Image (tube, rainbow, N blue to C red):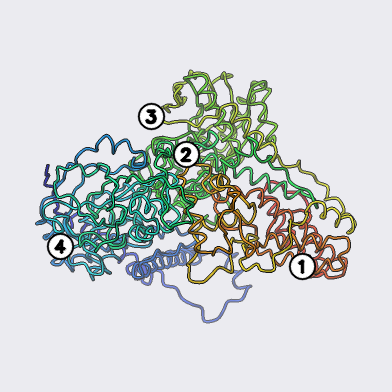
Amino acid sequence: MTATLPTRPRTTSLRDLARGLLAALALVVFVLGVPAALIALAPLYLPDDIPSPSQITSVLTGPDDGTLLLGALALIAWAAWAVFSASVLLELIAGARRTSAPRLPLLGGVQRTASQLVATAGILLALSSTTVARAAPAQAATAPPVTAQLRPAQSDAAAATPYNEPTTAPLPVLTQAEPALPVVTVQRGDTLWGIAERHLGSGPRYAEIRDLNTGRVQPDGRTLTSADWILPGWTLRLPADASGVPTEHPATAAAPRTPAEQQAITVAPGDTLWDVAATHLGDGARYGEIADLNRGRPQPDGRTLADADHLRPGWVLLLPPSAAPAPADPSLNLDAPTTAGADSETATPTAQDPGVPRTAAEQPQELLGPLRIAPAPPVEPSTQDAEAAPTIEDDQEVDELDAGAQRTWFAGLTALAAAGLIGELTRRRHRQQRARRLGERIPLPERGTPAARAESTLRSAPTPVSIEAIGTTLINLGCRCFDGGRELPRVGALLLDETTLTLLLVEDDPDAIAPFVARDSRTWVASTAEVAAETEIDDPDRCVPYPLLVTLGHTDGATVLVNLEACGTLAILGDDAAADEVLRALVLDAATSDLAGRLCVCVPPDDELTDLTAAFEPQRLRTVHSSDERETTTSAVSQALAAQGLDDTHQARGDRQAIDTWLPVTYVERTITGSACQPWTGTAVLTRQQATDSGAWTLTTDPHGAARLEPLGISVQPQRLDLNHLAALRDVLEVAVPPAPTSSPPPALAPLDEELQIVRDAHPAPPGPSSPDAQVIIRVLGPIDITGLPDGNGPLSPRMTELLVYLALHGPATGADLDEVLYNGARIKPGTRNALVYRTRRHVGEHALPLAGSDGLYRLGDAVTSDWDEFQRRLAEAVRADCGTPIERLTEALSYVRDRPFRGISGAEYTWADYDIQRMTEAIADAATLLARHQLAGGRARDALCSALRALAVNPYSEVLQHLALAAAESGHGADRAADLRDRFAHQGFELEADLPL
């Protein structure tokens, strides 16, 4: 089937020219006309002499004949002109350098106006190249018609192969060829003007690029609609005379008889490039070819392959061209499985087909021609140890993880809710570390218990963008609205997927605020890259504009967050068991997530949720015994708002008035007491009863896990907590309940001899002496680093590094142990782990990672040690009763500490190491405490301060170390240094909501 599609781009319209003319005229008037008028009407005269203070006072306090007023107005007018002109100049310089203009404090509105005028005025410059501008579109207009081919359906055998099922982004069945035009991938900071300057030699020709790409679907699903808005990762077609970029080759040019297809596979959970190369190329060692072909190529989730060991399920990988020619008969079923034979076993790279690019940088994804899923050739099950040969083959009988089985829930919660709960756990552990005394261990869930497994599961939850970044973006949105003198948008819900953050408004507001753009009057969208790039605006009066955002669940491709303030009342209806589980998840999320402001949630007495209160501080989750407390709170907020002429709490936050009404309270009422809650009234209600108020929101559930949120009309799979998950999470939180605040100072330190005994009992030496032959050092007391590796093998991949770190801390280990920690418990192909061990051994040498012994255990060789082992040995030597040089030994121990243990890892990495990090932190704090105490006793106050501050870089919240640092500062540096430290420590305590006096 063929279809002729129009390819003629639109040229510059009269409306564009009129807009450009008006913008240029406005710039001329403001930049040149205003100063000319001011010189004529309000010139500034400098005095001959500098006025004395008495003269200034006389002018300001004496009668004014109008001179002072006119002079002040003239100064204001000149200052306004200078600010605007400076903004225009910054925009012109930034445009010439193809960067974004620096933001001037408090001048965001002026800069945005200047930026829009400069960009719009640039349209006029395109008139100077009108003749050139029409040449490329004319060529595009005569391009051959686009041909769309319907591909044959897959055979049943091919469709039944789990490995070949698409995950998050199935390949399209209908493909189309486009005209042969050069293509460029947008990088961060690019503009259409800059791209036109680089590749067309003239910035005004940006209009041609805009016309060629308007309406084309980009890798993130968006389309180009404005010349002012392009995003990194987009691929733009350029006119035929562009230079410095590859040219797109039509498929028919390479093979006139039939379009050649580019083989591709979809990544399944647990896949590695070695597995893919072994399965589809017959040799795992050829994984580098696949990496080179796909590096930098945009994937369906908007990311790119940067590390050969970091693949994500759902990615589509192109495969190198096969030695066997593609079938010429288009009627053949190209997706049918192939048969294993000598050809597939001995396949080698062939010369590159002219129509097939060698790297992703040379050819974007949509220009590679039709893609097809390459079937997995049958292979014999591997019975040999992976180290015996470089080719790693996998057992064909192993059940693969289906795309639909990709982990969506983490202990019943979404990834975003799991990240919020982990953030609350981290805050609590910091509070516990603050109150910890010498030799004590803060409590952690026992290994292997449901609570420990639940915490590990929560820590493995990846999010497209962090909760902190979302919170910063929303706070900045509030600041920009306030600076611009406009109302906050009334957000009812948020949708977060891999590439975008979407705000769903409950009232029309078509004028979006950066970084958002308006899809329609009630939908604002920003890319997750823009959200992650947001930095907190320096505004001391800023507030959290939406303090009751809670995670609700998943749609087909996004996480849904609902604003309980916009709901007022949210009735959870439908299947009783499912609705109860949804209510539990909402309550837990509201009480822990930073997006919900960690505000107070009130639950009824004698309810299953009442047991949760033991795991929370009273200001977070408490029981309500008075039936009219909610109505009393609502009435008080209403009166406070009315006294200042405000409509509701949302307006109060936007106008930064009635501060006491900014923090709403959530009430859980299975049966509504009194009337339903109205939106933006300072309170919200979660109920299991149908509300009589027609404005209440409803979430109707069914037994199969689906639900519908009205009035937004969103179909969602809500997060649900059954009683087992609730009990496990309650145990995790209960173990981490911070100690109650106290105004008393920490108890006096014990005598040094007693402290030595305390540390000796708490931190025994590691088994075995230090190896004198150790060449490779695995360093974890700071950013992870491995030194002493052989030269010439290249850097270790992240997963290789994690393997070595785990064996250094917990080896010897079984294969099942490695699977659990390296792949988060996911079922993987048998060859995956073996391939990883084999590649790691090739990098570090067999002396560092020997072959598995007869016991089947993986272990490191004698040539490897770790800074953690060496630290423990020095600490154990220092606290021995017969040690005559404890200061020297403790100093040696602390010399191994470079920073916080495992610093730099993301939240979802090294989730197995949380126990280790906590114990390392405790040992470092104890060693520094002993050392600082010895140094103070010896009159070495400056050394004591250095020791205490070094440990405070690892555990900044330790009250014992803070007091030692203050004592050392007062003794060795004076009161000023101690006052600075006291302010710093007080600020840290405030961040933890643990502002204890020092």
Q: Which mark is residue 891?
A: 1
Instruction: Kindly identify which residue carries mark 2.
Output: 407
Dot 4 corresponds to which residue?
136
Residue at the extreme bottom of the image, as rendered:
48
Give neighbour class at mark 4: few <14, some 14-19, many 20+ (Cα, 10 Å). many
Q: Residues within 10 Å of mark 1 (few under 14, many from 20)?
A: some
Residue 83 on image: x %, y %: 43, 65
Label 1 to label 2: alpha-carbon separation: 46 Å
Q: Indicate the amino acid at tag 2.
A: Arg
Query: Relative to residue 146, is residue 41 drawn left or right?
Result: right
Compared to residue 873, the image places residue 466 above or below, namely above
Q: Secondary structure at mark 4?
A: helix
Q: Are marks 2 and 4 in contact (CB under 8 Å)?
A: no
Look at the picture and state if 367 lies above or below 631.
below
Label 1 residue SS: helix
- Spatial CA span between label 4 and label 1: 71 Å
Residue at 33 percent of width and 38 percent of height: 161
Distance between the alpha carbons at the discs numbered 2 and 4: 48 Å
Pointer 3: what residue? 713
Earlier residue among tags 3 and 2: 2
Which of the two labelled residues, at mark 4 and mark 1, occupies the earlier sequence position? Answer: 4
| N-terminal-most mark, 4 or 3 | 4
